[in-house]
Amino acid sequence: MSGLDKIKSQILDEANHSAEMKLAEANEKAEQMISEAKAEAEAEASKLYAKSKEAVAVYADRVKSSGEMQRKQAILQAKQEVIAEVLQNAYEKVCAQDDAAYFGMITRMLEKYAQPGDGIISFNAKDLKRMPKGFEAEMEKAAQKKGGSLKLSSEAKEMDGGFILVYGGVEENCTIRAMFDAKRDYLSDKVHEVLFI
């Protein structure tokens, strides 16, 4: 082998050795980059997993809260329907009392709502027909206790039950419906206490 061949061989050996070292270094860098990328990807995946897990938990809480709200609203609505039905049944029972009980109630109402002065009292057609004998005297007695007098109107009014008082052109609605409506909140609270507490 000549000197030139030796030099070529030596240059080739050095070049091969340098290439192998650079290739090894490049492989090592590539492995390190792959390892870092994997670690970054795993860290990002962990963050995304934690975020999505948190988002799922928040959504589940919202769904649960919404479901609970709907359940409470349904219960409230059902309670309100039961209370309304109880009040309607009570109203119907008051209107359907036998004559003695009904007109006893009317007398008590007159004692409360009659006013001083001359007034007119009106009933519905059904009550005018079933009014007990001597009831006009009872009405007058209740009015006199308040310092007034009452005249019975022969004209029937459209109403379920109770009466309407007129003093000096001003009407006072003392129908059973008006009494129930005026006390609706109080009666609803009482029914609620009895049924649900």
Image (cartoon, helix red, strand yellow):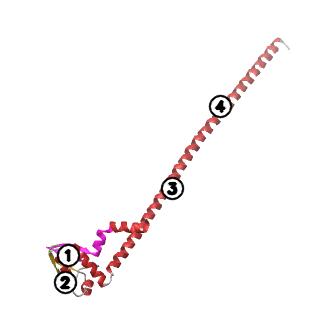
Judging by the rendered image, the residue that carries numbered circle 4 is 33
Determine crowd level at label 2: few under 14, some 14-19, many 20+ residues with C-alpha closer than 10 A.
Answer: few
Measured as percent of width and height from the top left, residue 168 is found at 13, 73
Judging by the rendered image, the residue that carries numbered circle 1 is 165
Q: Are marks 4 and 3 in contact (CB under 8 Å)?
A: no
Between the C-alphas of marks 2 and 4, the distance is: 110 Å
Measured as percent of width and height from the top left, residue 100 is found at 29, 84
Residue toward you, 174 or 37: 174
Q: Earlier in the sequence, mark 2 or mark 3?
A: 3
Q: Nearer the viewer, mark 2 or mark 3?
A: 2
Q: Nearer the viewer, mark 2 or mark 4?
A: 2
**For the residue labelled by badge 2, is the local secondary structure a helix, a strand or a loop?**
helix
Q: Earlier in the sequence, mark 2 or mark 1?
A: 2
Q: Nearer the viewer, mark 2 or mark 1?
A: 2
Whether residue 23 appears in magenta in the rendering, the answer is no
Q: Nearer the viewer, mark 4 or mark 3?
A: 3
Judging by the rendered image, the residue that carries numbered circle 3 is 64
Measured as percent of width and height from the top left, residue 37 is found at 63, 35
Residue type at the position of mark 4: Met
**For the residue labelled by badge 3, is the local secondary structure a helix, a strand or a loop?**
helix
Report which quarter residue 169 is drawn in: bottom left
Q: Residue furthest right?
A: 1
- Please indicate whether residue 119 sits to the left or right of residue 28 in the image: left
Report which quarter residue 30 is drawn in: top right
Does residue 42 appear in this view? yes
Residue that appears at 30% across and 68% down? 183
180, above or below 55, in the image:
below
